[in-house]
Amino acid sequence: MFATALLSALLGVSAYLIFRRANNKRPPLPPGPWPKPIIGNTLDFPLKKPWVQYLKMSKQFNSSIIYLYAGGNHVVVLNTLEDAVELLEKRSANYSSRPTNPVIDLYGKDQFTSSVSDLNFNC
């Protein structure tokens, strides 16, 4: 009985993971170190001389653009001036939107802004 339940659970989890991977609609990301479960690439971020470490990663992954993920943030490192000019100047309209704040969305977007002129301060 226990073996059947365990086998069913393993098959269910395996089917879910396969289905999720097959239906992943994300665009391809630049190469980078493989993220660890839960913490992502937090330990891969260099603390001293980051430009040197990013250059080493660039050579290791044979790409001038590197992708890291940590703390729920996607980080793209551009290691060449040509890539920076191409992405940040020539294609700037593609990346100019601001990120949304989920807390503001929960509480009702524009309700935090108000006009003080409507208040009547009679002392």
Image (tube, rainbow, N blue to C red):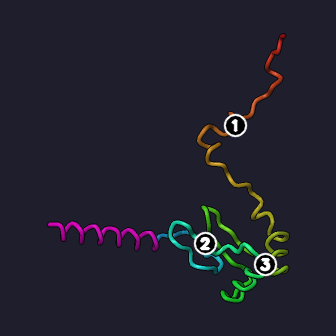
Check disc 3 and give the amino acid type.
Answer: Trp
Furthest toward the left, the residue is 1
Q: Nearer the viewer, residue 38 or 115?
A: 38
Precedes in sequence: disc 3 or disc 2 = 2
Furthest toward the top, the residue is 123
Check disc 2 and give the amino acid type.
Answer: Asn
Q: Nearer the viewer, residue 89 or 8?
A: 8
Picture residue at 24% right of the left edge, 72% below the top: 7
Picture residue at 71% right of the left edge, 84% below the top: 58
Residue denoted by label 2: 41
Q: Is residue 51 left or right of residue 62?
A: right
Q: Secondary structure at mark 2?
A: loop
Check disc 1 and give the amino acid type.
Answer: Asp
Judge whether residue 24 is colored magenta: no
Q: CA distance from mark 3 to mark 1?
A: 40 Å
Q: Position of residue 46 (x, y in %)?
A: 70, 75
Picture residue at 18% right of the left edge, 71% below the top: 3
Q: Position of residue 47 (x, y in %)?
A: 72, 72
